[in-house]
């Protein structure tokens, strides 16, 4: 028990304290999530991804393996959740909300910082690939699911061109391939922005949680939290055997799979008017419950 407490206090508690600062800023200073979200999304996060990929020099095989692992894990989890939801006869809109909140975990705000604290820079680089792959899936598969036919697959794919981290990955891989380096002033600027990314994401998580609204639908809520926090990492363990993940890649992949629901889902649900109150309730409850499942997982992964 003492080991678990140390793992929690050293790796998870700092995340909640930082998010708590964002929560208080939103509550008492009326800081809104949109402005912070845009800065983190369009400036800090792309710099972080670029910096990680160019500094760690992950191979093309590493990139392909982690992307494949992420896609198979997310899509298999979605298929399994959809089947269970259909068997439980969940109402259509609730089922869609359950799907998006189960499939997409908080790989950015929560996952990147936790991987850095627990396993270091190499695991963080692998975690960034998980984050980028899930971002791509959100703007393709996620949008198609949540729109239920109101948005074409073509428009969903075109939405990828609005995701800055996708460009960051492509440019970073190009720099690695050609062995290019940024001019020193630009390199230092990118590094400064990258260092600001994780603190900004954690504060943003707190701001978004403070703005969450409660909803009922107890059965759907229980299903989503179970699939997101327990079934997802267990499924990922099986998928990791298929892709032969090991070392920091295995640690990052399993830990990212265990993250609570992504706060980004609240934006998606609001945009498409798919049970936004339920989605924000899932985000809030899964985040609060996550230390109970992630702490023992950290012990298992050797943190």
Image (cartoon, rainbow, N blue to C red):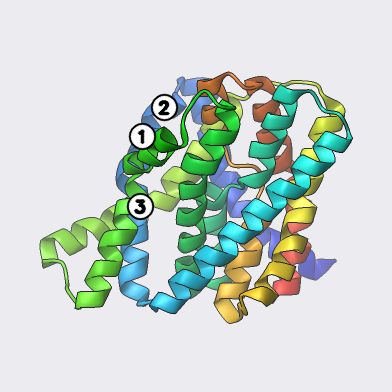
Residue 154 placed where, x, y %?
A: 41, 37
Question: Gap in Å between the C-alphas at discs 3 and 2?
Answer: 21 Å
Confirm whether residue 82 shows in the render.
yes
Label 3 close to label 2 by CB (< 8 Å): no
Is residue 23 depicted above or below 189 in this figure? above
Mark 3 lies on a secondary structure that is helix
Quarter of the image with the C terminus is bottom right
Q: Residue at x 38, y 37 (%)?
A: 159
Q: Examine the image and state in which quarter residue 177 appears.
A: bottom left
Q: Residues within 10 Å of mark 3 (few under 14, many from 20)?
A: some
Of 190 and 99, nearer the camera is 99
Residue 22 placed where, x, y %?
A: 51, 35
Label whose residue precedes the other's in the sequence (3 or 2): 2
Residue 66 placed where, x, y %?
A: 52, 68
Quarter of the image with the N terminus is bottom right
Label 3 close to label 1 by CB (< 8 Å): no
Q: In the shown orientation, is residue 208 left or right of residue 7? A: left
State the residue position of label 3. Answer: 166
Question: Gap in Å between the C-alphas at discs 1 and 2?
Answer: 6 Å
Disc ID at residue 1 = none
State the residue position of label 2. Answer: 34
Mark 1 lies on a secondary structure that is helix
Q: Residues within 10 Å of mark 2 (few under 14, many from 20)?
A: few
Q: Residues within 10 Å of mark 1 (few under 14, many from 20)?
A: few
Confirm whether residue 6 shows in the render.
no
Q: Residue at x 74, y 69 (%)?
A: 238
State the residue position of label 1. Answer: 38
Q: Nearer the viewer, mark 3 or mark 1?
A: 3
Q: Residue at x 70, y 64 (%)?
A: 236
Label 1 close to label 2 by CB (< 8 Å): yes
Of 210 and 138, nearer the camera is 138
Mark 2 lies on a secondary structure that is helix
């Amino acid at each position: 028990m003492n080991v678990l407490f140390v793992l929690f206090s050293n790796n998870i508690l700092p995340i909640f304290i930082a998010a708590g600062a964002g929560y208080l800023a939103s509550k008492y200073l009326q800081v809104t999530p949109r402005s912070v979200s845009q800065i983190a999304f369009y400036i800090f996060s792309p710099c972080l991804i670029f910096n990680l990929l160019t500094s760690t020099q992950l191979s093309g095989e590493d990139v392909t393996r982690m992307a494949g692992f992420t896609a198979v894990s997310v899509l298999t989890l979605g298929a399994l959740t959809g089947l269970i939801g259909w068997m439980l006869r969940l109402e259509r809109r609730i089922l869609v909300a359950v799907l998006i909140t189960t499939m997409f975990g908080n790989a950015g705000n929560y996952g990147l910082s936790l991987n850095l604290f627990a396993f270091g820079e190499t695991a963080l680089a692998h975690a960034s690939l998980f984050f980028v792959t899930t971002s791509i899936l959100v703007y393709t598969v996620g949008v198609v699911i949540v729109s239920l036919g109101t948005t074409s697959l073509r428009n969903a794919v075109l939405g990828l061109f609005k995701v800055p981290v996708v460009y960051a990955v492509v440019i970073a891989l190009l720099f690695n391939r050609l062995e290019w380096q940024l001019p020193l002033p630009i390199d230092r600027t990118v590094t400064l922005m990258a260092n600001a990314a994780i603190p900004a994401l954690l504060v943003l998580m707190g701001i978004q949680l403070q703005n969450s609204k409660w909803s009922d639908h107890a059965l759907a809520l229980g299903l989503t939290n179970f699939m997101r926090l327990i079934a997802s990492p267990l499924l990922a363990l099986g998928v990791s055997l298929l892709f032969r993940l090991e070392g920091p890649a295995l640690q990052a992949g399993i830990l990212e799979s265990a993250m609570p629901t992504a706060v980004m889902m609240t934006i998606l649900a609001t945009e498409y008017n798919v049970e936004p109150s339920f989605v924000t309730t899932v985000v809030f409850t899964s985040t609060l419950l996550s230390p109970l499942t992630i702490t023992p997982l950290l012990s298992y992964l050797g943190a």
